[in-house]
Amino acid sequence: MPIEVEANLAIPRIKNPMTGEDGYPIDNGSVRFRKLIQVSAIPKPGEVLQLTTRDGVEFAATVTRAEWHEERAIFIVSCRYANRSISPSECASVFGDPEWVMRPLL
């Protein structure tokens, strides 16, 4: 039976960063992307998740931790892009997907 969890994704910085609505560059190191996904079991740190964007781009992410969020009653699975670098097209695909919600770090 699938379990719904929230993926909390960190992606690497790119040479030519995406720009925000204000026209300023967005530092990928200072934001996270979150999306609700279905998994068969709560992934453990070190496991690899296959994630997708709406336009069909698939990529791997390594789980760094999974924790229960009491107030929202959901597991949050923190993960990072599995490769050292992300291509500009993959980065644009994550930024442009309305299912991946960008959240600045405080």
Image: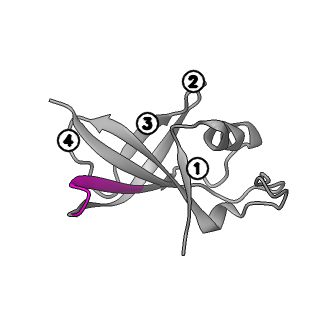
Foreground residue among 35 and 51: 35
Q: Mark 4 points at which residue?
A: 41
Q: Residue 71: percent from the left, percent from the top?
A: 23, 63
Pick whichever of labels 3 and 2 is earlier in the sequence.
Answer: 3
Q: Residue 80: percent from the left, percent from the top?
A: 49, 55
Pick whichever of labels 3 and 4 is earlier in the sequence.
Answer: 4
Query: Could you tell me if the residues under marks 1 and 4 are in contact, i.e. CB atoms within 8 Å?
Result: no
Q: In which quarter of the image is the N terminus?
A: top left
- The amino acid sitting under disc 1 is Asn
Pick whichever of labels 4 and 2 is earlier in the sequence.
Answer: 4
Query: Could you tell me if the residues under marks 2 and 1 are in contact, i.e. CB atoms within 8 Å?
Result: no
Please, what secondary structure does the residue beneath circle 2 have? loop
Query: Could you tell me if the residues under marks 3 and 2 are in contact, i.e. CB atoms within 8 Å?
Result: no
- The amino acid sitting under disc 4 is Ala
Residue at x 66% of width, y 38% of height: 96
Q: Which dot marks residue 50?
A: 3
Give, as a single range, the part of the protein colored magenta: 71-78
- The amino acid sitting under disc 2 is Gly
Q: Mark 2 to mark 1: distance in Å?
A: 18 Å
Please, what secondary structure does the residue beneath circle 4 have? loop
On whether residue 97 falls in the magenta region, the answer is no
Q: Residue 24: percent from the left, percent from the top?
A: 83, 61
Q: Mark 3 to mark 2: distance in Å?
A: 12 Å
Q: Mark 2 points at which residue?
A: 56
Query: Could you tell me if the residues under marks 4 and 2 are in contact, i.e. CB atoms within 8 Å?
Result: no
Query: Could you tell me if the residues under marks 3 and 1 are in contact, i.e. CB atoms within 8 Å?
Result: no
Q: In which quarter of the image is the C terminus?
A: bottom right
Q: Name the residue under label 1.
A: 83
Please, what secondary structure does the residue beneath circle 3 have? strand
Q: Which dot marks residue 14?
A: none
